[in-house]
Image (cartoon, rainbow, N blue to C red):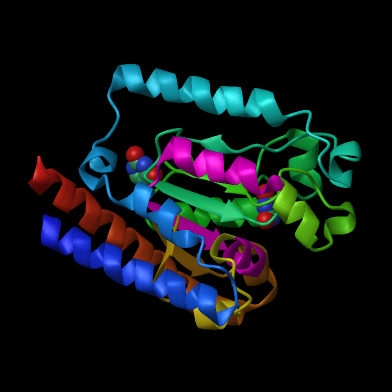
Amino acid sequence: MNRQASLADLIRETVEAVQQEAEQGLETHFLPEGLDKVLPLPERRRKPERAAQSDRATSLEALYERYHLCTACALGHQRKHFVFGSGNENADVMFVGEAPGAHEDEQGQPFVGAAGKLLTRILNAIDFTRDEVYITNILKCRPPNNRDPRPEEIDACDAILKEQIRLVQPRLICALGRVAAQALLKRNSSIRTLRGRFHDCHGVKLLVTYHPSGLLHNPAYKRPTWEDVQMLRKEYDRIVQSDAKAT
Ligand code: URA
Ligand code: URA
C-alpha cells in the first residue's frame, strides 16, 4: 500500500469510527489512540523476526501471569480455569468469541466444546488451522449457566483483550457473535447490520459474523457465515499479496 492509500484508509476509518461514536453519543476518544496505532503502518506491516517472536511470547505469557488469578469481577471467584487464549502468538487473524462455556472452564482452553468443534471446521474450510490463528474470548471466565456477560464483566476484562490485540498484532479480527461484535465495536447494532463488511478495531480490520453456537441452532445462519468467512480469507490473501509486493 502506498502512503496515499494508507492515509486515505486512515481518514475513512477515522471518519467511520467518529460517526459510530457520535451515533451512540460517546466522546470521540478514538482519535488519539487510533492515530498512534494506525500511523506507523510500515512498522506494523513487517512480520516479527525470530528474536522478536520469543519476546512477544514472553509478553503474552507475562500478560497471562498478570491476570490468571484475576478477581476483578465476581466470575473470578467461580471459575475452574481462567481461559486466556490459544493458537499462534503472531497470528495474522484473531477470532474473538463471547465467553468460556462449561468445557472451556473445565479445560482452560477456548472453543473446545461443540461450538469449538464447529469453529475448527469453519477454519479448515477456509484453509486455516487452529494453530495458525489466535483464538480468544471477550470474557476469560465462565458466566454461570452461560448467561450473557454483564457490562461490568466486559469492562473488567476489556484491558486483557486490548493487550492481546496489541501483542499479537493481527491484521484481521473476526468477531464471533453479537456479544463479541458489540463489545469490540462499542456499538449496540445487531449482527445482521454489522456483518458483511470490515470495521475498524484499534486500527485493525474487523469482520463480524454469527457465533458457531448460533449456527448449531439456526441453519439459516450457515450461508451468511460462509460468505463472511470467505470474505475474511480473501482479505487475508489480499493482505499477504500486498505485503509480498511491498518487500
Ligand atoms: N497464517 C498465519 O501465519 N497466521 C494466521 O493468522 C493465518 C494464517
Ligand atoms: N463459546 C464462546 O463464545 N467461546 C468459547 O470459548 C466457547 C463457546
Q: Nearer the viewer, residue 142 or 114?
A: 142
* Location of residue 94 with respect to 182 vertically, above or below: above
Residue 221, x across and y down, in percent: 57, 77
Q: How many marks are shown on the rendered structure? A: 0
Quadrant of the image for the N terminus?
bottom left
152 to the left or right of 56: right
The magenta span reads: 157-183
On the question of residue 127 being in view, the answer is: no
Residue 45, x across and y down, in percent: 25, 43
Who's the residue at 47% across and 23% down the image? 57
* Location of residue 119 with respect to 46 vertically, above or below: below
152 to the left or right of 201: right
* Location of residue 141 with respect to 31 vertically, above or below: above
Who's the residue at 83% across and 36% down the image? 71
Quadrant of the image for the C terminus?
top left
Residue 161, x across and y down, in percent: 59, 45
What type of secondary structure mainly makes up the magenta span? Answer: helix
Residue 191, x across and y down, in percent: 57, 77
Residue 160 included in the magenta stretch of the image: yes
167 to the left or right of 220: left
- Write down the quadrant of residue 73 in the picture: top right
Who's the residue at 36% across and 73% down the image? 15
On the question of residue 241 being in view, the answer is: yes
Residue 241 included in the magenta stretch of the image: no
Q: Nearer the viewer, residue 30 or 145?
A: 30
Who's the residue at 62% across and 55% down the image? 97
- Write down the quadrant of residue 175 in the picture: bottom right
